[in-house]
Image (cartoon, grey):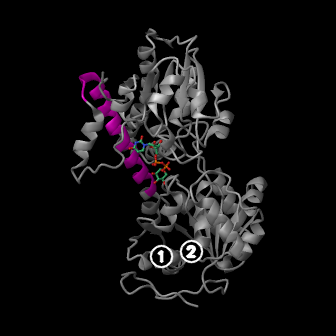
Amino acid sequence: MTIAYPSNQSLQTPLTVSPPSGAPRPRLTFLGTGYLGATYAICFAEMGYDVLGFDIDEAKIAKLAAGEVPFHEPGLDELLRKNLGTGRLRFTTSYDEVADFGDVHFICVGTPQRADGLAADLSYVESAVTGLAQRLHRKALIVGKSTVPVGTAEWVEDMVRRLSPPEATVEVAWSPEFLQEGFAVEDVLRPNRVIFGVKSEWAQAMLYAAHKGVFDLAQTEDREVPIVVTDFATAELVKVAANAFLATKISFINAMAEVCEASGADVTQLARAIGYDPRIGNKFLRAGLGFGGACLPKDIRAFQARAQELGVGEALRFLHEVDLINIRRRQRVVQLAAELLERPNGPAGPDLSGLRIAVLGATFKPNSDDVRDSPALSVAGKLGRTGATVVVYDPEGLANAERELPDVHYAKTLSDAVSRADLVCVLTEWEEFRNADPVALAELAAGRRVIDARNCLDQAVWVRAGWVYRGMGRPALT
Ligand code: UDX
């Protein structure tokens, strides 16, 4: 079968393309079955593609093949089991199998921050591309999805040219992704845009064919998914520029929170008021404990490092300030805790020994079990270092949190964490915490003091239930 572009696409490419494997639709592989790769593999199988997921981690592959998603993401377990059942989705640890099977290979491995600086560690990208390219024996498209420093796609293309057999004429493309944890299934099935960084019409046509499921779904729902066809460098930059913008927006409102704290204003009302201006918009303007997770913090650092290498470090110097504003919010919670518990906040930090603090939330955001660079867990650690007994509860992140921060206590339920606490700190805005009954919790706690580090509780209701409430960037209500 050949695939035709819809008539409304003004793409300067041939209208049809046949997958090199001879299959009716391109067969897709996803290398790296972490958050990104596993979600993509499962969702693209759901859209009808034949998909092979690859990872070097045998335990992870065994879990996925047995129908178990190795992380918490709403809706994904069900789709995994459904698509394993159809036979469209399989998993492997064999590069040979990946090379034999696929027409389009998506590189989805991690690009963490390097241990020796701000830059991104590209060693996983290098080993995935190396492992695959040397085994390819017919034409194929290798598509980078991982978040990388600008220039990486050219480097990957060089590697592929050196390693793959010349007769296979393997090509490279770059197509960044924008999925948000907690909404990952929706973001993959219904993206708000797709980016094709390509050098040839064939690569563009193959990428289109590999996304036809996304466009078909949109058509049945009377939506449009804009496609931006561009060069490698722009495609790579789209991702880091988007994350830098989001991080800046969050730090902007957190900087306003600092000013509100000093002047008696309320940042939640300020955010609402400025957000009504459509040029500003009300999304990503929630002041609180700031951003964490596996993307925003390391992406803004790697972006600065790359800009420095390119000789334009000054252009991104503001991102250093964005990072500092973000980190300062964590210390602010410790400062508020000292104030509420009436302990002096000395240069070495407050001494909160003898006190018990309930920490509600360990993950970097709700509806995830991810604790990577989690502001909540960072604050739990800081509170632990004040000498206080810290008891952490999180609906999904306990196992990961215990591994990451073993030297605090963990409770299995919200009530257990709050029991006998002198202070309650809400550090992740889980629905369970937003809906918690402050009257019932007041019965359990030793002291009715609450820090709402995500501004997610109803201040008036908590104050009525007898709690001393402190939000972030908001005046105290009595
Ligand atoms: C982010 C990007 O949104 C996504 O497009 C990209 O692909 C990966 O990085 P994610 O890390 O899942 O996604 O989380 P996101 O929802 O962006 O939140 C990041 C952090 O910012 C969280 O810690 C969240 O609590 C915080 N945040 C978000 C705020 O503090 N205030 C806000 O208004 C919004």
Residue 174, x across and y down, in percent: 51, 65
Residue 343, x across and y down, in percent: 46, 9
Residue 314, x across and y down, in percent: 36, 40
The answer to whether residue 59 is visible is: yes
Residue labelled with disc 1: 217
Answer whether labels 1 and 2 touch (C-beta < 8 Å): yes
Which segment is the magenta one? 239-265
Amino acid carrying label 1: it is Leu
Using a 10 Å C-alpha cutoff, classify the residue at mark 1 as few (fewer than 14 neighbours), some (14 to 19) or many (20 or more): some
Q: Which is nearer the eye, 214 or 422?
A: 422
Q: CA distance from mark 1 to mark 2?
A: 8 Å
Q: Is residue 417 above or below residue 174?
A: above
Q: Which is nearer the eye, 67 or 458?
A: 458
Residue 81, quarter of the rendered image: bottom right
Q: Quadrant of the N terminus?
A: bottom right
Residue placed farthest to the bottom in the image?
Answer: 1
Q: Is disc 1's CB within 8 Å of ligand 1?
A: no
Which secondary structure, mark 1? helix
User: Is residue 258 within the magenta segment?
Assistant: yes
Q: Is disc 2's CB within 8 Å of ligand 1?
A: no
Q: Is residue 394 above or below residue 169?
A: above
Amino acid carrying label 2: it is Met
The answer to whether residue 136 is visible is: no
Q: Residue drawn at (35%, 34%), measured in percent from left and top?
A: 254
**What secondary structure prevails in the magenta region?**
helix
Q: Residue drawn at (21%, 50%), measured in percent from left and top?
A: 277
Is 81 displayed left or right of 428 in the figure? right
Residue 47 is labelled as 2
Which secondary structure, mark 2? loop
